[in-house]
Image (cartoon, rainbow, N blue to C red):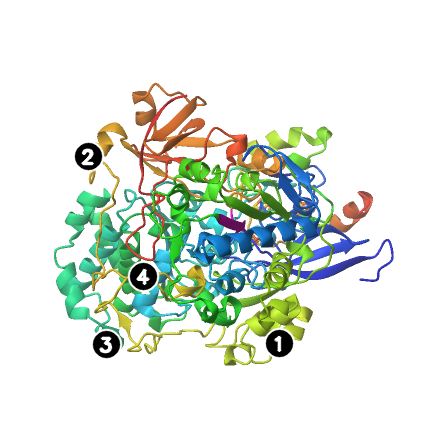
């Protein structure tokens, strides 16, 4: 980086945040400083714009609260009292402690905990997996979002990207099912709104009037957790009215007779009782969907967040095959296009190093694990946390804090800031940020590879995650060659550059261009991946019926470990499965806690990132609680009152906003606010029980009560 | 609270700003554009597109332009949506030059 003082250089970047858009960025660098970011104008999805969170990403790099040096705790746990130590001291202390624990308790007493706080192949979700797999540490299953949907999708259609998100420009009927695209998938929304301008009808299914629902041609608002009933009733209408594509069904699907039988009693009238949506609306919706090709469904992550959520996704994933939507460019369903990306997760995670019998814990149940409520043969004595912040993001928060307060728990955290979780660290390591490290960023929202240039030095002594693991591996005596790979060598090894989808693309190409479209199956104007079936399932067909299926979590979310999968038998067909906590299904609990809560992402934050930045808090506003007027009056709550939301698991506070955007019986409070800046956070009230598949969350399956604070 | 258009946007209609917007938040006044604060998602994509620096996020707004917050709120509600690029007004380039851009 030789440059004169006034010369501005531009480098390719990739947004590393947990967002499906994975924007291609331009880093503007002057004098070794990041002075600005832009969306890459040449990228067909980014189209020159970023979002409210990232538009001034440079400020996050230079935020005055950034961690610059390794720190060691000096006060009580959580007190944020630390002293500066050197990297050598920090890494020596960690490795000595871990060696002691391994000697006394065995490696199962140690666990990693990371998520998609960084989506880089090198420094992200799976970045430390090889290290901990080599150690033989307890495997951490990480199922914050999308894992139930992955299981449902894989069972039904296999690892396909489905309809290309860009092909939605050709769609005439677009269903956005449980996704607030305007806030969390903005660049896909842009494509959808273009289609809308060109005459496509946009239907948004969401239990409250999100920003996206307000832009829809039709907003359908089922009660939380009842989407499965809606989807089953659509199947019922399509079959009973003869709207199905029999030729497609006969050639490319399995289990039509069984599905027909199952759907027989799932009438619109039956679904009206459950969902609160008039039967006539359900009929109209099914008819329109079945007769307006090309029809595309965008499956949102939120759909899985109730006990029966994944079954709902399975039902919805059957719809395109039933009506032959897959025949058309711009027809089908979209879940996570990541399935067609050429990443070598086995090389990244090295599951071959995992000793047999290694136990698994799940990060949603971290509180139970750390407090001993979950019975483990070897209790956890040490945890390393990076790219995640369980105190705000995981359920049963109060329990997690109890666990983190344990004097005998040795907690290592790599972070950018003293997050709620980092506050409890024994050793806190300063982590590098976006422009400070080389990586390629995975995408679960489009079909492009994205490159990120290291174009500035990290501040102070901050280090990239992968460098931390390289140095720890050295101290632990791990000699496998992957622990010596530079970040560049990692990229050379982590991507299957020889696969047909990378034809003409290599790392040099990525460095020069910043992004590359995957080559398989044609571009957005021709891709009809399943026009002739060809589903990547064992039979090559779409499975309405899956015989002998058992529950599992997809490999990348459990360090590619196949041991101790959930394993219980699954229903062979999709269906509606009621939530655990609603007034209809649990009247006893509802007598105490009558309201269902939904906790979507905040528009101005990215999970808990940016919720410590003053401007972003101003933009987003303080924690609020959307409540319907009827419910507010019943509790003596007026607009702007500070209210307390609570159940047996915990409580948080927010400012009441009385709104018709929520129906009576539901409240909405968005996620991400920091506990150290607020009175509790949303997840204090969330249950850590799993949904029906993929150990999904149940964030939208919780009953609460609201009172004046 | 939102991103807004200020008085530098008079008789311009370069409208690069409009094509950058992912949510169709721009409204067309006779002389200038406005942003509907209830539609805008503050993504910032339009700001660098404006050749005369007429667009600001309210958090960065110079104080002497404060009145434009209310003007955008009010005018955006009665003006039609503009979502496509239009030909610039005659003299737009001269005006741009006179503003020092
Ligand atoms: S958070 Fe999403 S929309 Fe925003 S810049 Fe990153 S990838 Fe793009
Ligand atoms: S580019 Fe700037 S000056 Fe021109 S129309 Fe848009 S806001 Fe107005
Ligand atoms: S900030 Fe973004 S959403 Fe707002 S007007 Fe500009 S481009 Fe549109």
The circle drawn on residue A35 is none
Using a 10 Å C-alpha cutoff, classify the residue at mark 4 as few (fewer than 14 neighbours), some (14 to 19) or many (20 or more). Answer: many
Quadrant in the picture for residue A68: top right
* Front label number (4 vs 3): 4
As helix, strand or loop, the secondary structure at mark 1 comes to loop
The answer to whether marks 3 and 2 mark residues whose Cβ atoms lie closer than 8 Å is no
Chain letter for mark 2, please: A
Q: Where is mark 2, residue-wise?
A: A587
As helix, strand or loop, the secondary structure at mark 3 comes to helix
Sequence-first disc among 3 and 2: 3
Using a 10 Å C-alpha cutoff, classify the residue at mark 3 as few (fewer than 14 neighbours), some (14 to 19) or many (20 or more). Answer: few
Q: Is residue B15 visible?
A: no
Whole-Å distance between the Cαs marked 1 and 3?
41 Å
Whole-Å distance between the Cαs marked 4 and 3?
24 Å
Task: Between residue B44 and residue A709, name the one nearer to us.
Answer: A709
* Front label number (1 vs 3): 1
Sequence-first disc among 2 and 1: 1
| Residue at x 24% of width, y 58% of height | A287
Task: Between residue A93 and residue A134, name the one nearer to us.
Answer: A93
The circle drawn on residue A152 is 4
Q: Where is mark 3, residue-wise?
A: A247
The answer to whether marks 2 and 4 mark residues whose Cβ atoms lie closer than 8 Å is no
Q: Does residue A238 lie above or below A100 as drawn?
A: below
Q: Where is mark 1, residue-wise?
A: A506
Whole-Å distance between the Cαs marked 2 and 4?
29 Å
| Residue at x 25% of width, y 57% of height | A286
| Residue at x 56% of width, y 80% of height | A503
Expressed as whole percent of the image width and height from the top left, the position of residue A126 reads: 51, 61
Q: Does residue A375 lie above or below B66 as drawn?
A: below
Sequence-first disc among 4 and 3: 4
Along the horizontal axis of the image, is A61 left or right of A252? Answer: right
């Amino acid at each position: 980086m030789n440059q004169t003082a006034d010369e501005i250089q531009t480098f390719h970047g990739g947004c590393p945040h947990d967002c499906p858009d994975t924007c291609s960025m331009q880093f503007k660098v002057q004098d070794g400083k990041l002075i600005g970011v832009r969306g890459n104008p040449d990228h067909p999805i980014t189209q020159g714009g970023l979002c409210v969170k990232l538009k001034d990403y440079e400020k996050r790099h230079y935020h005055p609260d950034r961690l610059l040096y390794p720190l060691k705790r000096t006060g009580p746990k959580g007190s944020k009292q630390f002293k500066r130590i050197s990297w050598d001291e920090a890494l020596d202390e960690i490795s000595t402690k871990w060696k002691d624990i391994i000697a006394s308790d065995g490696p199962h007493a140690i666990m990693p905990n990371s998520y998609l706080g960084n989506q880089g192949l090198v420094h992200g979700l799976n970045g430390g997996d090889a290290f901990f797999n080599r150690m033989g540490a307890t495997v951490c299953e990480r199922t914050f979002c999308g894992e139930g949907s992955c299981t449902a999708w894989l069972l039904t259609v296999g690892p396909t990207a489905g309809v290309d998100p860009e092909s939605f420009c050709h769609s005439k009927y677009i269903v956005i099912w449980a996704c607030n695209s305007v806030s969390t998938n903005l660049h896909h929304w842009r494509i959808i709104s273009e289609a809308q301008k060109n005459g496509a009808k946009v239907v948004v299914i969401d239990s409250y009037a999100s920003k996206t629902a307000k832009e829809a041609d039709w907003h359908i608002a089922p009660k939380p957790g009842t989407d499965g009933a809606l989807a089953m009733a659509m199947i019922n209408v399509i079959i009973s009215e003869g709207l199905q594509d029999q030729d497609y069904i006969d050639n490319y699907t399995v289990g039509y007779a069984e599905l027909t039988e199952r759907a027989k009693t799932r009438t619109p009238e039956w679904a009206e009782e459950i969902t609160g949506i008039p039967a006539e609306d359900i009929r109209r919706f099914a008819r329109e969907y079945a007769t307006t090709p090309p029809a595309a469904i965008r499956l949102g992550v939120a759909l899985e967040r109730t006990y029966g959520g994944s079954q709902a996704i399975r039902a919805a994933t059957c719809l395109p095959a039933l009506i032959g939507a897959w025949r058309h460019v711009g027809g089908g369903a979209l879940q996570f296009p990541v399935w067609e990306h050429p990443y070598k997760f086995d090389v990244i995670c090295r599951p071959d190093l995992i000793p047999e019998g290694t136990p698994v814990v799940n990060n949603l149940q971290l509180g139970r694990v750390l407090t001993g409520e979950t019975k483990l043969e070897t209790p956890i004595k040490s945890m390393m946390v990076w790219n995640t912040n369980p105190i705000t993001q995981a359920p049963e928060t109060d329990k997690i804090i109890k666990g983190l307060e344990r004097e005998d728990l040795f907690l290592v955290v790599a972070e950018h800031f003293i997050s709620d979780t980092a506050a409890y660290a024994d050793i806190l390591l300063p982590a590098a940020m976006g422009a400070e490290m080389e990586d390629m960023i995975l995408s679960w929202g489009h079909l492009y590879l994205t490159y990120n240039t290291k174009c500035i030095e990290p501040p102070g002594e901050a280090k990239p995650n992968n460098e931390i693991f390289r140095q720890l591996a050295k101290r632990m005596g791990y000699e496998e060659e992957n622990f010596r790979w530079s970040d560049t060598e990692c990229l050379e090894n982590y991507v299957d550059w020889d696969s047909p989808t990378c034809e003409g693309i290599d790392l040099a190409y990525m460095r020069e261009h910043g992004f590359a479209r995957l080559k398989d199956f044609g571009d957005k104007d021709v891709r009809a991946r399943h026009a002739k079936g060809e589903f990547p399932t064992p039979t090559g067909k779409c499975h309405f019926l899956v015989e002998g299926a058992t529950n599992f979590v997809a490999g990348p979310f459990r360090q590619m470990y196949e041991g101790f999968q959930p394993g219980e038998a699954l229903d062979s067909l999709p269906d509606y499965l009621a939530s655990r906590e609603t007034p209809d299904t649990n009247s006893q609990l509802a007598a105490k806690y009558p309201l269902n809560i939904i906790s979507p992402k905040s528009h101005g934050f990215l999970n808990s990132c940016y919720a410590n930045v003053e401007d972003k808090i101003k933009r987003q506003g303080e924690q609020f609680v959307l409540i319907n007027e009827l419910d507010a009056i019943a509790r003596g709550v007026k607009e702007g009152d500070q209210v307390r939301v609570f159940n047996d698991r915990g409580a948080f506070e927010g400012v009441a906003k009385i709104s018709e955007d929520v129906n009576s019986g539901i409240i909405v409070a968005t996620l991400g606010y920091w506990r150290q800046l607020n009175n509790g956070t949303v997840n204090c009230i969330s249950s850590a029980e799993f949904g029906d598949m993929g150990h999904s969350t149940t964030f939208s399956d919780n009953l609460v009560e609201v009172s004046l604070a | 609270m939102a991103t807004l258009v200020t008085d530098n946007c008079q008789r311009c209609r370069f409208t690069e700003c409009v094509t950058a917007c992912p949510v169709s938040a721009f409204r067309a006044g006779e002389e200038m554009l406005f942003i509907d604060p209830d539609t805008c998602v503050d993504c910032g994509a339009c700001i660098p597109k404006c050749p005369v620096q007429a667009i600001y996020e309210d958090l960065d707004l110079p104080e002497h332009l404060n009145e434009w917050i209310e003007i955008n709120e009010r005018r955006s509600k009665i003006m039609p949506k503009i979502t496509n690029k239009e030909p610039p007004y005659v003299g737009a380039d001269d005006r741009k030059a006179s503003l020092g851009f």
